[in-house]
């Protein structure tokens, strides 16, 4: 009796009918083109638009592609980009958070007050306002426990501890306080949307106005909290890594990306599953290295116009954005929580029938968005060196939402990536920076930015319609 050896995994694969047909490079390219024709555009329009804008401003302005302006551009757009990264989680459910901008302003105001008042929030706020502030944090902690959002509960309790302790000013403690306050705000927003059942547009519009009043109450009309004298807080958006540290970051980023992509590719090959052709996988790694290495080299050159001052190294905002990008991408792509977000965003009723706690997911994304908005507040406050009553207001929220949508995240839910917020944020930063170098007034900047956002929303709507017709 003869026996035929079956490679490991092939029997199971055959039993379940999994397609194991390997694609050639040509077939993969044609398949990608077919997806584009079917409306699955992803971030391609934003990437092409970004490239076009860079070329246009490079031609029109001599100062656009200078080393100093390039590094400054990254720092200018990082705050709104980070807020947009958190908003992607909300947009994936087809919801909206109009209060993210002013919520970030509240976080910035509390952080700055703790520093300016030497840790004495009671003295800075006054007895009545401080009691309401702590009471709000207690309510947020209780609501988080009720909804089983344990991270929100812990962060709200940490904020209470810092506020009541009167701890001496410390930049790391103040940044932690800002994130904790942001998480508490997100818990309240999430509760009103998911448990009370109010539309997110109405809830967050009301909170947008409310948090504006809170900021004004904390800082005072015409007041300002300066944080530029605190070295660590100021360095978040204005400092640079050492030359050696910059190259280490480049190596870790490129090497880490290569390990993850190749590891996943080889793992799928070993299990007999369909994966992209190896040449395409290698080409992606080479493309990332081709961007990272020259950029790092350029940023490690001295970009100071003063012969007595040396400014070189990758800005600190770059590793901050990269860490958030990696963490956010991992959460959405590799965790059960991330899969549940996509499921609820795609079809909430089907997700509920599949046993997903839709209410919990809907509440939790607002906690993620508000906590991330607090990180954005730290960055943009560091950039200007102060916090005033307009913190988080004006165009902060609109640009953050615009960054996510321009990058490819759908306003209709179910489609988007954290990477989209980064690409969209770069587009808006280039528009603002480039028009500023061309001496264009704020009116022109707003008009162009609005048209870019309108174009992105149009592309999103048309691509979804095309996708629906192609099914």
Image (tube, rainbow, N blue to C red):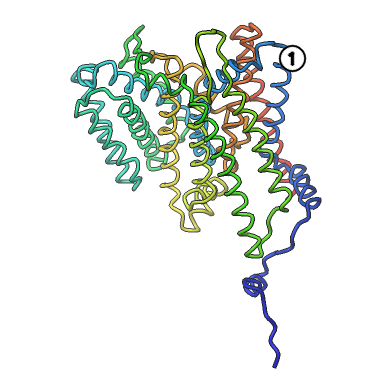
Q: Is residue 114 left or right of residue 203?
A: left
Q: Is residue 416 left or right of residue 161?
A: right
Q: Residue furthest bottom?
A: 1
Packing grade of label 1 (10 A; few <14, some 14-19, many >=20) is few
The total number of labels drawn is 1
Q: Position of residue 168 (x, y in %)?
A: 22, 23
SS at circle 1:
helix
Does residue 210 show up?
no
Residue for point 69% across, 11% down: 61
Give the x, y percent position of residue 161. 22, 33
Return the residue nearer the eye: 263 or 428. Answer: 263
Q: Is residue 308 left or right of residue 153?
A: right
Q: Quadrant of the N terminus?
A: bottom right
Vertical order, 277 against 321 (above or below): below
User: Residue drawn 65% across and 29% down?
Assistant: 294
Q: Which residue is at the front of the view, 297 or 272?
A: 297
- Residue 250 can be seen in this image: yes
> Which residue was labeled with disc 1?
59
Q: Is residue 430 left or right of residue 283?
A: left
Q: Nearer the viewer, residue 468 or 140?
A: 140
Nearest the camera: 55 or 19?
55
How far across and how far down the image is residue 256, in percent? Answer: 55, 44
**442 is higher (above) or lower (below) than 328:** above
Residue 311 on image: x %, y %: 52, 17
**Image quarter for residue 63?**
top right
């Amino acid at each position: 009796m003869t026996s035929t050896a079956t490679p490991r995994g092939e029997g199971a694969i055959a039993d379940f009918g999994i397609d194991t047909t390997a694609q050639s490079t040509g077939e993969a390219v044609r398949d990608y083109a077919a997806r584009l024709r079917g409306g699955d555009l992803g971030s391609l329009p934003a990437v092409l638009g970004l490239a076009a804008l860079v070329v246009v401003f490079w031609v029109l302005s001599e100062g656009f592609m200078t080393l100093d302006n390039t590094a400054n551009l990254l720092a200018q757009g990082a705050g709104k980009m980070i807020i947009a990264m958190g908003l992607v989680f909300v947009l994936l459910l087809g919801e909206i958070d109009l209060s993210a901008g002013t919520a970030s302003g509240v976080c910035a105001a509390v952080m700055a007050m703790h520093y300016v008042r030497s840790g004495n929030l009671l003295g800075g706020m006054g007895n009545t306002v401080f009691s309401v502030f702590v009471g709000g944090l207690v309510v947020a902690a209780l609501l988080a426990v009720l909804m089983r959002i344990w991270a929100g509960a812990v962060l709200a309790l940490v904020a209470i501890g810092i506020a009541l302790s009167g701890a001496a000013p410390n930049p790391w403690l103040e940044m932690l306080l800002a994130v904790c306050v942001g998480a508490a705000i997100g818990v309240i927003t999430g509760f009103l949307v998911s448990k009370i059942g109010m539309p997110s547009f109405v809830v967050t519009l009301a909170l947008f106005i409310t948090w504006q009043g809170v900021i004004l109450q904390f800082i005072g009309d015409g007041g300002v909290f300066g944080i530029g004298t605190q070295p660590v807080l100021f360095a978040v958006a204005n400092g640079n890594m050492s030359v050696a540290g910059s190259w280490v970051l480049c190596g870790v980023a490129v090497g880490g990306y290569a390990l993850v992509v190749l590891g996943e590719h080889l793992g799928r090959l070993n299990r007999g599953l369909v994966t992209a052709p190896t040449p395409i996988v290698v080409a992606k790694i080479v493309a990332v290295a081709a961007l990272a290495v020259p950029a790092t080299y350029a940023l490690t050159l001295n970009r100071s116009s003063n012969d007595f001052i040396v400014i070189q190294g990758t800005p600190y905002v770059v590793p901050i954005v990269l860490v958030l990008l990696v963490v956010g991408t991992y959460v959405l792509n590799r965790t059960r929580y991330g899969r549940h977000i996509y499921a609820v965003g795609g079809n909430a009723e089907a997700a509920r029938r599949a046993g997903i706690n839709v209410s919990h997911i809907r509440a939790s994304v607002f906690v993620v968005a508000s906590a991330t908005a607090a990180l954005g507040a730290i960055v943009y406050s560091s950039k200007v060196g102060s916090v005033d009553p307009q913190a988080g207001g004006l165009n902060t929220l609109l640009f953050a939402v615009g960054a996510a949508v321009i990058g490819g995240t759908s306003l209709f839910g179910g489609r988007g990536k954290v990477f989209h917020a980064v690409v969209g944020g770069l587009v808006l930063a280039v528009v603002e920076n480039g028009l500023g170098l061309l001496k264009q007034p704020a009116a022109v900047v707003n008009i162009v930015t609005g048209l870019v956002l309108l174009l992105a929303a149009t592309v999103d709507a048309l691509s979804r319609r095309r996708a629906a017709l192609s099914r």
